[in-house]
Amino acid sequence: MARVYETVGNRCGRYAAHMKDEVDTHNASPTVLHETKEWLVVNKPAGWHSVSRQVDKGENDAAEQGERVEAARSQTKKKQTDISQADHDQSVQAWRERREPTARSIPEAGLCHRLDQGTSGCLLIAKTLEAHERLRTAMGGADGAIAKTYLALVKGGLDKEGNFRLHFEGRYKRSAKVSVSRAGSWETGGRCKWKVLRHIVARGVDVVEVELIGPGRRHQIRAGFAYLEHPLEGDTLYGAQGPSHFSLHAWKIIIDGMTVTAPPPPRFVP
C-alpha cells in the first residue's frame, strides 16, 4: 500500500490557514441566528467562553484551563499573553448582559447550556426566567425535546455511519479530561450517532455529522471519538497531533419545532 508523506510546504500551509481561521473567529462577536418572544439562538465564535469567567468556577473552568494550557504549548509567549488578555471578558454571558441589561436577573443571563471555549455554533439563550427553567429542563431530558447536531473533524478512516453509547466521568476533582468506559450508570451515559459527510484528503480528516441522543455529557463528542481512536483534529487534550485547536461546531438545534442552523467555519469545508 502506497504511503503518503506530508511535505513541509503542505504542513506550513495547513498551519497558516488554521491560524488565520483562529484569528478571524477570535476577533468575531456572537451573532443572533433566530429570536422568538421566549428565546434566541446565537452563533458563538470559537475562542469565546459561554459564561463569564467570574462565575465559571466549576469543572468546566478546569477543563477550559487545561485546554488553554494544551493550546499554549504550540504558541509563543507573546501569543499566550494576547490570548489571556482577550479571554478575560470574551463570554457570551457578558455579551448578552451588555446588549440586554435585564438579562442579569436570569441565571447566567439566560444561557440554557454551555459550549466549550473552542467550540463554535448554536447556543440557546432564554429571555425570561420561566423560559429558562422550561428550556433547561428540556435540554437535559431524554425525550429529545431539544435536538442538537454537531459537525466534527475527526481522524480519517471512520466508518461511514455508526453510533456509540459510552460512559463519561471526571477522573478527579478539577480534571481537564474525562474518562470513558463501556459500562456505567445512567447518570454518566451518553449516546451519539454519526454519519461521515466527506473526507478531506489533504488533511486526512473526515467531516462528520454527529447527533446527540438524550442528555449530553461533558466532552461527550471529543472524548467519545478519541475513545474510538478517531480524535478530533487538533484536540491535543485527547491525543490528536498539533497545532492545538478545536474542530467541533454546534451546527443545528431544534427548539419548539424550529430548526436553527449556524453556518460552519471555513475549515469545515474542503
Image (spheres, grey):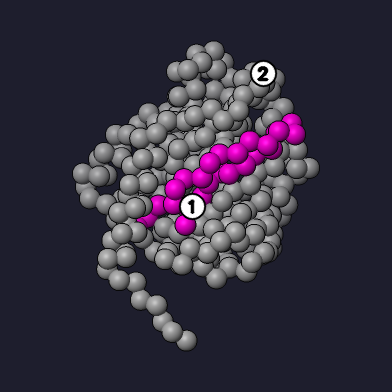
In the rendered image, residue 252 lying in the magenta stretch gets the answer yes
Query: Which disc, if any, is residue 201?
Result: none
Residue drawn at point x = 36 percent, y = 45 percent: 22
Q: Quadrant of residue 142?
A: top right
Region rendered in magenta: 243-270
Task: Estimate the x, y position of residue 201 in percent, counting from the top left.
Answer: 46, 67
In the rendered image, residue 33 lying in the magenta stretch gets the answer no
Task: Estimate the x, y position of residue 14 in percent, counting from the top left.
Answer: 34, 59
Callout 2: helix, strand or loop? loop
The residue sitting at the right extreme is: 143
Callout 1: helix, strand or loop? helix
* Residue 143 horizontal side relative to residue 53, left or right: right
* 101 relative to 22, above or below: above
* Residue 269 horizontal side relative to residue 244, left or right: right
Residue drawn at point x = 66 percent, y = 49 percent: 212
Residue drawn at point x = 71 percent, y = 50 percent: 213
The residue sitting at the front extreme is: 270
Pair 2/1: label in front? 1
Which residue type carries mark 2? Answer: Lys
Lower sequence index among marks 2 and 1: 2
Residue named by callout 2: 37
Rounded to the nearest angstrom, the CA distance separating label 2 from label 1 is: 32 Å
Residue named by callout 1: 268
Residue drawn at point x = 72 percent, y = 27 percent: 134
